[in-house]
Each structure stands twice: as structure tokens, then as C-alpha cells.
Image (cartoon, grey):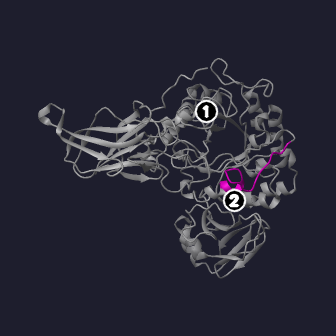
Amino acid sequence: MKFDIERPYEPKNSEYRFDSFASGKTLLNKKKNILPPMGWNSWNAFGSGNTEKLTKIMADCFIELGLDKLGYKYLVLDDGCYLPERVDGKVANEETKFSQGFKALSDYIHSKGLKFGMYNDVGTNLCAGAYVGTCGHEETDAQCYVNWGVDFLKVDNCYYPWDNATFSDAQNARYVYAPNIKSISLEKVSDEADGKASNTNTAIKSAASDGVLWGEGAYVKEDYVTSIGTFDGTGPEHSPVGPLSSELRFIISEAPGEYLLKVEYSTGREVGVGSWLQIGINRAESAEADIVYDDFVEETKNGSFAWTEPIKISISHGENIIRIMNHRRQENTLCSYAKLLEGLNKADPNHNIILSLCEWGKTQPHQWGYKVGDSWRILNDITFRVGADGDPGHADWESDYTPGVAPQYNKAVIMDEFAGLDLGWNDPDMMMIGMDGLDMTQCATHMAMWCIMNSPLMLGLDLRRVNKGDDIYTIITNTDLIALNQDRLGIQGKRIYCSNIVTDPSTTYVRDNKRVDAVAKPLSDGSVALAFFNLDKDNKSDSQITISKDDIISFIGNKMVNKECFEKAGSYEIRNLWTKETATNSDGKFTAPVLEPCGNYVIKITPV
């Protein structure tokens, strides 16, 4: 089949633009004040092999294990549940694995007092290949999900037609990078020449020598600038904090008036060089750019350079900045997810569907995801070795790439400022507790990490492997840890100590796991949760680590319910959230014991 939508969805207004990402304004009546969702997702347990029968068994296990009473509510069907192509333009159930249809399964799950979740993709296909992605079908699909009683929608990013996303054509990079830029030309429009340029007043500015590089990624190569755009955040290499895209800027001091702007460029269809150009102008009185061009330019051949057609612009008094850029990687993806939210709103203006954005951190969704989504994946999958019926799958503590607990934690732990009740949640993927490859110490630390970071708590194991009272059950039902995750204050924990960091531990990205972290989280009752994590899988922590109340206040005092009470308390009640033991502390210094490899120590500190 041929995909018949050739152009990305256009930003409807400035709130869909890059300059608005820090505005704090949501779009399309996106719901707020939603705590991190808790539940189960089928992918890690069964991959594409999930069935109606297995899903019902998992629902029954929820009730038998009492998980529903602890807050675990959502049962989510992941990839592999649809027919490979649409039927009469609609997504349809795979007839062997889901013979009764999705509405019947939804009714069964709802009859248990649980909530029903499903999966799709903003691309043309699902990641497993079915040609039933929502792209171009948002309204139709949204109506189906509303009709089926869907409460949670995980939306992936494979086969995305306007980016070189997973399984997409690599040449789609042409959408998300600007061309190579050699220079710009500014020609003053003469009033006497009836709006035409005056050849006697032309300025040529070199990208390499006159331009200013902003952000991260672009660089000067020979006599031109290349790699203007947003770099791919799917892998573990880059910090999520700081500029994640780049621009070429020219600070203009020409006389005010009308000008014709031309850009000398060379196109490509590969990472770093594209064919889509955005030109914006920031004037002294405006923080947002006036977009004067946002489209493909005519492609050049064999690396040759050409000039764009003239673009009429206005230069005002004061500083003017001409911005040569391409933020379409982020803007396109935001617009696509927004299109689906529009469809859900149209199908039911009062819907309460949780929208889980799963584009693996590719377009830095922590910068814009809050506008339309309730959570956003921050990296690629936590494991690529998923299970099947009878096979638990495999999990890792660490890896050179994204699979593993530590790589996901290492990014998420410094992303606290991007999350909150008014925004949504950073999602380091579903949990791997109970899969082969992690021992119980690692599973316990995995749980503690996800809880204090306000990550969605989506179980990913075959629940038939859990028995009441066993080690896995004890970990996933720890009510004290769950209470941290579900605390109504809704603030992600902040890293306030890292044994590998001299500078600010709350924003410095660290991939070396031979270290100990301390993470503090303010709670709604005025107390503070403090967690110590030894990320080293081979060695115990070197020595005891002490965090003082002053350390805590200096990092999270502005977010605490009653900082003064905490600061001036004569003593503190200390509750160990694993052993449930309590003790009294009178000096305001909180010390972790020596930690086992991958061990953790989590306490709740309550001022007395």
C-alpha cells in the first residue's frame, strides 16, 4: 500500500513551535494532576505473542494477588494484537489470538474493577510491522478506542514517515535537518524601486565567519555549517539536560526597513544534512521568532550549492537575529501526537484516556511532551529480549546501550525538572522485576528507583510467576515505596549527591555505574524520602555516606511543604521503607550503611 500523506502536519499556532516548548502551556485540554499510572504491559512478558486468554489470566492474577488494591489498575495490550492491515479503514483484532474482540476483552477487564489499555503508533506501521499505524487515521482510530472503552493508550514511533525513526527510510532525515549553509544575502529594498532590491545595497554574510552557532550539534566544516537540527536522543550518549538542537544565527545591524533574504545552501538526505529549512527572525521586542520560511528547498546535486529564491523580510530597530534552523524533528512529532489527541477529544470530549508517548526519547519529548501527553519514554526499550508464554525473557542491570536498569535510571534521575503534576512523567520504560537476569537485590533497587523518580509503575512480567509472600511479591507490593510514587505532591526525586561528581549532581549526566547516588524527594505531609543507590554491580560501596538536612534543603527546599519545620525540627523519625523499622535522629545527619552491589537504602525522614 502507498502512504498518501506526504507532508508533516503543520503547527496550528506558535504553541506547537520550538520557541514555546518552555512556555508551560498545554494543548487541546490535556488533562493535568494525573499521578504516574500503575499497571501491567504485555510486551516484556509475551512480546507479540500476547493473547486474549493470557490477558484475562493476568487480570485474574491482579485480583488474586491484590495488586488492584495497591494502585495497579491498567492492563495494556502492546504490539501484536491487530490484523496486519485495516478492515474497512479500521484497526481490527487478530482473530486467532483475540477471537472475542477488543470490546469484549475491555468489558472483562472492567468487570474486575481494572482499566483497559491498548497500543498503536504515530507512524504508518506498528513496530512489529502491521500496516495499521494511526498516521492519517487519527480520528477513525480514536473513535474505535473510545468505543472499546480504552483507558490507556501507548503510542509508539516506528515507521514514522517524517523522520528516520525505527524501520523508516533513512532518507527521511531530509525532513529533520537543514541543508548545509554557506552564506546568506541581504538586499535592501529601495522605496524608489517599487519594492525591488537595490543592487548597490547588498550584504553577503558567511556562515563560517559571520554566523553564530547556537545550541549543540551544528559545526563548521570547511566554509559552510552542517548538522543544523535536533540530534537523535534515542541512544545513551547525550545528556538530556541542556540544548539538544542547534541553529545558525546572524545578528543583524543593518538599517531598519524591508530586505530580500537569500540563503546559499546544499541539500542531502542523511543524518546531519537535509532539505527542510526553517528561517525565523527574532526582533528586539519579541522572544519568539517570526517564521518567514518553513518548507523544503529545491534539492541540489552532488554537494553543489545554490541560492534560495528571495524572501521578503522586515528588519526593525534594535537587535535582529536571523535564525537558520530546522526544529521539525520535534515539531513534527508533537503535531502527530497532538493529531491523535484531537481525535480522542472529538470522539469523546470528556474522555480520561491516559496518553503514553513512546518515541524513545528520539525527539527529546521531555521538552514538549507535557503539551499533549501524560508520560513520555526517555530512551529506547529497557530490554530487547522479551519473553513468551513459558519464557520469562531476559533483563540486564547495565549495558553499553539502553537496555538495562542503570542506563534508563542514569538519564531519568536528572530529568526531575521536566516532570510534575502539571506536566506529566518521565518514563524509563516498564519494569523488569521478575525477568531472568536480575537478582532480587537488583529488582528491589529497580523498584525503589522507579518509585522515587515518579516513573510510571508498569509491571512487565508474567504474573503467574508471582506468589503471595515471595520475593517478587514483596518488592512489587511495598506499600511505602508505592506511596512515594503516588504521593499527592507529585514531585520527582532529585539527585543531591553522586560519588562521581564534583559539580552539580542534580543535572550532570553520568554513565559510569561505579558510584553511589543519593536522591531526595519532598512529600505532601512535610516529610522527605531519601534513597541511596549503589549502581556498581560488582562491588560494595566504599564507605558510609552521610547527607545532612542542610544538603536536602539546599536542593529541594523550594519544593518542600514546610521547609522551616523540617529545618528547625529538634529531631526526626526515620523509617526504613524496606524493613519498616523506625528510629529517632537528633543531629539532622542521615547516613546510609555500606551497600551491597546494586543495593539500596531508602528512608522516610519526618520532622518531629
Q: Amino acid at mark 1?
A: Tyr
Residue tagged 2: 449
Classify residue 186 as left or right of residue 173.
Answer: left
Element on which disc 1 rests: loop
Q: Residue at x 51, y 46 (%)?
A: 368
Classify residue 30 as left or right of residue 306.
Answer: right
Residue 557 point in image, percent of width and height: 54, 69
Question: In which quadrant of the rendered image does the C terminus lie?
Answer: bottom right
Classify residue 108 as left or right of residue 402.
Answer: right
Residue 209 point in image, percent of width and height: 33, 52
Residue tagged 1: 159
Q: Is residue 94 above or below residue 579?
A: above
Element on which disc 2 rests: helix
Residue 341 can be seen, yes or no: no
Residue 198 can be seen, yes or no: yes
Return the disc, 1 or 2, that comes first in the chain's sequence.
1
Q: Residue at x 64, y 58 (%)?
A: 410
Magenta stretch containing residue 393, yes or no?
Answer: yes
The magenta stretch spans which residues?
Answer: 391-408
Q: Amino acid at mark 2?
A: Met
Alpha carbons under labels 1 and 2: distance apart: 32 Å
Q: Quadrant of residue 117?
A: top right
